[in-house]
Image (spheres, coloured by chain):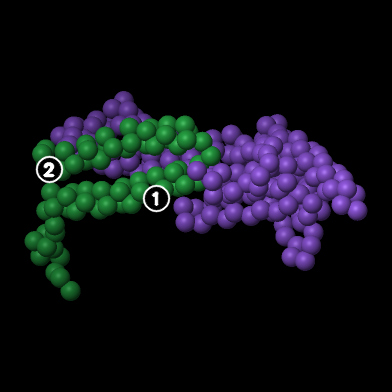
Amino acid sequence: MVPLSELSELTIPLHTALTLVFYLVVAGYTIFTFIMYYHWNEYSLDNKVSRITLIFYFLTTLPLVICMGLITFFIL
Amino acid sequence: MLFEKIELEPSEAVILTVRKHWFVIFSEIIGSFMMVLVPLITIIMLAFSPTLPAAVVVLADHFSLAAYALSLWTLFSLMTGFMIWTHYYLDLWLITDRRIIVIDQVRFFNRKVSSFRLERLQDVKATVDGIIPTFLNFGTLHAHTAGNNEENFTSTGLPDPRGLQATIQKATDERLRQLSTMTQIGE
């Protein structure tokens, strides 16, 4: 059992924690994107709807991932 | 694309493609939209709250950290929204002049595709239950097939279930008439 007084020495630095979270998010996002792309590519009835959905998906989500990356590696 | 996978028979024509009613997707996706708005509403409320101005100062001091958290939250909310939209769009009933194909996209890795021929259809039942479904005209459709392995197909939240029931019934009658004519010609 770690004494509470020593706990602060064991905590992960904020930057390391945020970097770890960022890597996990990128991994999750990549897997989710692949699954979503596969479903729209394989099971959709309309190419146009698939294209619009995927464009809208990348336009809304990719800037957020980039923003997180910029904050992790350049700002914090 | 889906039509290539389903492999419609030669001269088989698609009569109708039905997805769930818009209210179903609206009621599901509104939660995701609210999730996107929650941090913004919270910040606005904090900014205008006379008792909590310190919280805004703390947020301003740790702007990059707040932006990181906001990006993460918004990303998850959007991903949830796109997942709901994907399930909605890929979930459908395909009515052709020979059969009915029911595609149920439960989750990303749970997809059920059932198909039954119109001549096997024994009963179609439409149910509209509740105030909102009655006003917006959506409900549940049950299809019951005859034969050795009797099956039931049920889908909730379908638009105009009575119209859909009539279309299926009409297509079934037409199919039975065609088959009867073909049998008579054969004899």
Kindly identify the amino acid type of the residue bearing the numbered disc 1: Ile
Q: Position of residue B38 (x, y in %)?
A: 38, 36
Which residue is at a point 73% across and 52% down the rendered structure image? B117
Contact between marks 1 and 2 (CB within 8 A): the answer is no
Residue at the outermost top position: B48
Answer above or below: position of B173 versus B108: above
- Report which colour depicts chain A: green
Q: Position of residue B97 (x, y in %)?
A: 73, 42
- Chain bearing mark 1: A
- Report which colour depicts chain B: purple
Q: Secondary structure at mark 2?
A: helix
Q: Position of residue B64 (x, y in %)?
A: 17, 37
Q: Secondary structure at mark 1?
A: helix
Provide the residue designation for mark 2: A73
- Give the class, few, some or many, for how many residues have Cα within 10 Å of label 2's Cα (few <14, many ≥20): few
Answer above or below: position of B142 versus A47: below
Kindly identify the amino acid type of the residue bearing the numbered disc 2: Phe
Q: Which mark is on residue A35?
A: 1
First reached walking from the N terminus: tag 1 or tag 2: 1
Q: Using the rendered image of the protein, determine whether residue B151 is visible from the camera's viewpoint.
A: yes
